[in-house]
Amino acid sequence: MNDPPAPMVERLEAHAYRIPTDVPEADGTLSWSSSTLVVVEAHARGHVGTGWTWAPAAAVQVVEELLRPVVLDASALAPAGLQEAMVVAVRNAGRPGLVGMAISAVDIALWDLGARLLEVSLAQWWDLEPRAVPVYGSGGFTTYDDERLLCQVEGWKLAGVGAVKIKIGESSGAEEQRDLHRTALVLDAVGPGTEVFVDANGGYGRAQAARVGHALEDLGATWFEEPVSSDDLEGLDRLHQELTLDVTAGEYGYDLPYFERLAPVVDCIQLDVTRCGGYTEWLRICRHLASRGRDVSAHCAPYLTAPVATVTPNLRHLEWFHDHVRIARELVDGYTEPVGGALQPTDRPGHGLSFRADRAERYRLA
């Protein structure tokens, strides 16, 4: 007797939404007042799989023109193969950047769709044992005054997180002192037992990053994210060798070769599932890095990342990023809150999240 035919992807849609920040935000290199969310939905046999990425609205056009023709009428139970086909299809457009973010959103939607069709969680489909993953509070934008900064940090502390992260990287001498002042303020507020991370977003040059890094060590910070540009591998390596606190980078990686180059020059590698190629590439990258004894940390999009983070043995923690948590709570059903500073695995089909387009309509761009 022949097996029934596999369900095929019947429809693939993408829409962009621009959501204002609650207050103006900035880091060491950029300022912004909104975030653009590109949501992808894949349909088959009455089921919908959802993925998203934080990308310019032009990612919608990438999905529609380059990726949709690859996915439509293909098996909805073969997301890894479709991810490979999408990578081939974008050869002339280039994979990094906008295209990589679009691929990530589609890949996540396809995995979610397939698991829902099979009525299993993603961990069950991957045949991997999930575990709770610790989160760290992340925000602390340079636009915050001391009062707002402390209010946010104290909220994370009350939630039981084991670490908090703030933005630094303002580059003049006076602003450098402000960076250190804010770090000292947070260290004093959280007290012993809670780590303090800082993220310069590539805002320093090598010499200044080294100087600030040593000052951060003296204060007691333990994590120095993107002290220089993530493209400056030599600079990262020098700081990695010179400083005792963890030097980290990786959020702008779009494929395995990038992380192969980055692995020797940082202490912990950051992966963003909405940029690196979705769940398919995340699993591939993490297996490769584990074989080299390297830890990873999940960058942003915590609810969407949680299913794959819970099955990653070499994962340290998951970034509980202020904007993405706030927006998901408004526009997504099915999320859970951290318990004891950790997100628990879910046994719901797929990633367990549902995007509420009705709530998001007022933000829609395309």
Image (tube, grey):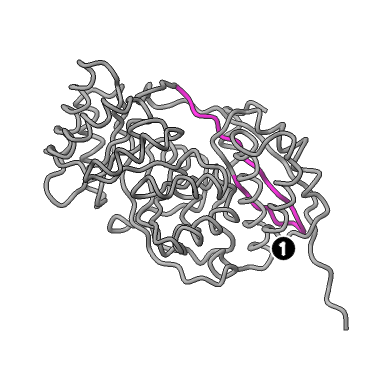
Magenta: main secondary structure:
strand
Q: Is residue 328 left or right of residue 278?
A: left
For the residue labelled by badge 1, is the local secondary structure a helix, a strand or a loop? loop
Q: Number of numbered discs present?
A: 1
Residue, x 68% and y 33% (percent of image)? 60
Q: Residue at x 41, y 30 (%)?
A: 229
Q: On the image, numbered disc 1 is attached to which residue? A: 77
Of the 4 image quadrants, the one containing the C terminus is: top right
Q: The residue under label 1 is which amino acid type?
A: Leu
- x and y percent of residue 41 in the render? 67, 46
Residue displayed at 24% across by 32% down:
210
**Residue found farthest to the bottom:** 1
Measured as percent of width and height from the top left, residue 287 is found at 50, 62
Residue 176 image position (x, y, % from top left):
22, 22
Range shown magenta: 33-51
Where residue 269 appears, x then y in whole percent?
Answer: 41, 48
